[in-house]
Amino acid sequence: MEQQMSKDYQGTDELTINLKNIFLALWNRKFLIAKIFTITLVFFIAMTFISEKKWTVSADLYINKANNTNYLEINPYALEDVAGGGLGSMLGGTDPLANEIELIQSPLVIDKVIKENNLRFKKLFGIIPTKKAGQYLTTEKFIKAGPQFETKKGTKVLNISYTSKNKDLAYNVVNSIITNYIQLYKEVNSKKSKSDKAILESEYKKAKAELDKKVNTASGLPSTSLAGSGNLAALSAFSRSAQNAIANIKGQYVAGEKSRIAVSESAAKVSQLAQKLEWANLVDEMSDSSKVLVIKEPYPLRDWEYSSPKLLINILLGIVFGVIFSIIGVIYKEVTDKKLSYSMLGNDVIYDLEKEFNKLSAKLISNSENKTAFVKFEEFPVLLQEKFKNFTNVVSVKADISNDFKTTLKDIESIVLFATINKTDSEHYKIIKSMLEDMNKNIVYEVILN
């Protein structure tokens, strides 16, 4: 039960801890500990029911960010936003909805939320008017102390939550954020789709005009024109006129091939732009729809659905602080107690003399050549007096602050103290121990009388 931990500092100071004394001190104060612990636990439990309640409303949004169309699977021109949800998301380096969170937290959304819910600066401490009191909150102030935005890991699901002392306000704020964000999202999509459509229409008209121009200016002979020139080619070996005719036909053929290739390229470009323009028209028609899907809608909370304080958390806090306050109470009581306590004892202690009588007897017998003084703070029971009659080397003296006490102990080196817990005066006990240490007396044991 008893352990000692010692550490010397430069050979002069020694720190010793007697775990048995600590345990007995705690056990001796068990009623005080129980009282403090119970009061603390009851206080924290009561705080659950009397402290101001807070409600938290939350919602989950699924945000599809692929190029303003819900048909990414079949739209060959829809590209995933690389920075927001594509490559960066796959590499795990960025939040796939970082841009969307910034958009939600922008004044374009938050200012409307603040005004719709009449969120204003309040008086300082609720009573002191300030210049800002009564004015609408700023976006920065609201975001700093207001809603929470969190992307669920590995998804494009955004969680929005808001905590307030007013459950209706909590619901209205979350609902307002969602409504205004979706409206802003529609406006952004509409502007982008109209811009894309205008660019494609311009490029399509240019490509179509260029194609028409190339078709109208196409010249030369088709590739089939050389099929019947075999005889003419044979005569070209004997006739200069035939040679000139063959050269002219080849030139016309080359010009015709060039015109055909140019027209084919322009036609392919026009065809590709026509397909993109077709998709742009479709996206423009869909731009008034939102790609934000509310997969968990906010709902008005009931009175008992508050988020804090929570009974279980308060019970745990009550247990933790109950233990802490109990230890503090024990330490305070041990330090200030006017009666002797276990924490005031040293390391060589006999806690039950009846059980440990042989331990003390062995010490007295081994030191029989020298006298040992029994310094008594309390009188011995009759049975103990009988047991100590056989020890001739023992001198019994009452603990007293006097010259007679000092004189009696002048030629004695070993001391055994006898005192009673919760009965012996603590101040008197400390003074006597200090006197004995100043007299260089060796305190062999401190015996606790029951």
Image: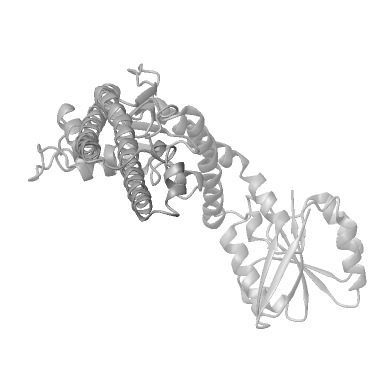
Q: How is the image coloured?
A: one colour
Q: Nearer the viewer, residue 290 or 239?
A: 239
| In front of the other: 442 or 60 | 60
- What's the residue at 88%, 68% (across, down)? 364
Q: Quadrant of residue 357?
A: bottom right
Quick check: 263 above or below 176? below
Q: How many marks?
A: 0
25 left or right, relative to 210: right
Left/right of residue 250 with respect to residue 408 in the rendered view: left
Query: What is the x, y in percent for residue 297?
Result: 37, 20
- Residue sticking out furthest to the front: 238
**Residue 407 x/y as whole percent:** 69, 79
159 left or right of 259 in image: right
Seen from the viewer's position, the closer of residues 392 and 257 is 257
In the figure, 188 relative to 413: above or below?
above
The x, y position of residue 113, in whole percent, is 20, 31
Q: Residue at x 81, y 50 (%)?
A: 382
For residue 52, what is the image quadrant?
A: top left
Describe residue 208's horizontal placement relative to residue 306 as left or right: left
Q: Position of residue 84 (x, y in %)?
A: 38, 43
Note whether 192 is above or below 445 in the view shown.
Answer: above
> Which one is nearer the viewer's eye here, 143 or 375?
143
